[in-house]
Amino acid sequence: MEETIIAQRRQKVEALREQGDHPHANDFRVTHTAAELHDLYSDAERWTLEALDEAAVKVSLAGRVRAVRRFGGMVFLGITDGSDVCRPGDDTPIGRRDFQAALFKKVLRDAHPQSWQRLDLLDIGDIVGVTGQVMRSKRGELSVNVAEMRILTKTLRPLPDKWHGLTDVSARYRQRYVDLMMNDEVRRAFRTRSRVVSQIRRFFEARGYLEVETPMLQSIYGGAAARPFNTHHNQLDMPLFLRIAPELALKRLVVGGFHRVFEINRNFRNEGSDSEHAPEFAMVEAYEAYGDYDTMATLTRDLVQRAAR
């Protein structure tokens, strides 16, 4: 079944090329994200159908098609562009923002007939770019009245089921990009991790710690009891190891005169893996001259409290 779908979509790729459209275009310019569009014009009392029509705001947005609804001479596309809805008064992402693109045959037939013809080559999962005027549908939904639509990236493989998403746990880890398309919880986890790392960095910098980067390739591995990954430096003809911890290099920096140092980086341990242990992982490690166990215990407590805010 999937092979048949892929073959059909390859034919559509060739059809796009024949009509002069690049199936993987990179020359579309976006003016707004879906989140920005809703932030600016979602107030239905201020931006009524008539007010939007009078303002005649032109926008260009791009995103992945998640739904196609056809009603004779009207087609509505549900498009997601990766922008997120944030909690009011905060920048914490709480969901993904989509937008609706409305294509009317009677409008495009004269203004841009090629846009209407491209709908025959469109599939769910394709990335499209739309340019048009901000409008509100009769049901009150904020939309873009499309004056031009381009298929920017033609997808070959079908997306997982819209309602059930990607359920195979192994596939979710191996194809994280697909999981990100389908699962808002995973997207939030990625953004939350980024915020936590930023908080950790600011925490150390505010206390006078210098962020450093120490070598990944080491001639002597240490700082932990673990099996390393081995490699070989051809020019120097010497064995090297992917580091299992940055401890030794960080302590040398303290000896060199930097009394407070920290590093957020990758470590590698050639051992078993499970849901809580990976051969490659990120770790924060810090050292302070003249500090003791109590110093680092207090630092760690404050760090966890700050990162969890």
Image (tube, grey):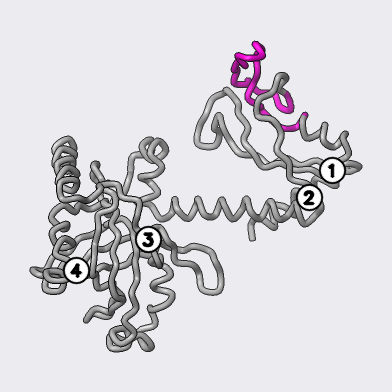
Mark 1: secondary structure: strand
Which residue in the structure is indicated by mark 1? 288
Residue at 49%, 62% in the rendered image: 93
* Marks 1 and 3 in Cβ contact (< 8 Å): no
Which residue in the structure is indicated by mark 2? 299
Task: Please state which amino acid type lies under the numbered disc 1.
Answer: Glu
Q: Distance between the residues labelled 4 and 1?
A: 62 Å
Mark 3: secondary structure: loop
Disc nearer the start of the sequence (4/3): 3
* Marks 2 and 1 in Cβ contact (< 8 Å): yes
Structural crowding at the residue carrying mark 4, measured as other residues with C-alpha within 10 Å and reported as few (<14), some (14–19) or many (≥20): many
Classify the position of the C terminus by image quarter.
bottom right
Disc nearer the start of the sequence (1/3): 3
Disc nearer the start of the sequence (3/2): 3
Give the quadrant of residue 38: bottom left
Which residue in the structure is indicated by mark 4? 103
Which residue in the structure is indicated by mark 3? 29
The residues colored magenta run 222-248
Task: Please state which amino acid type lies under the numbered disc 4.
Answer: Leu
Q: Distance between the residues labelled 3 and 2?
A: 47 Å
**Mark 2 or mark 1, which is nearer to you?**
1
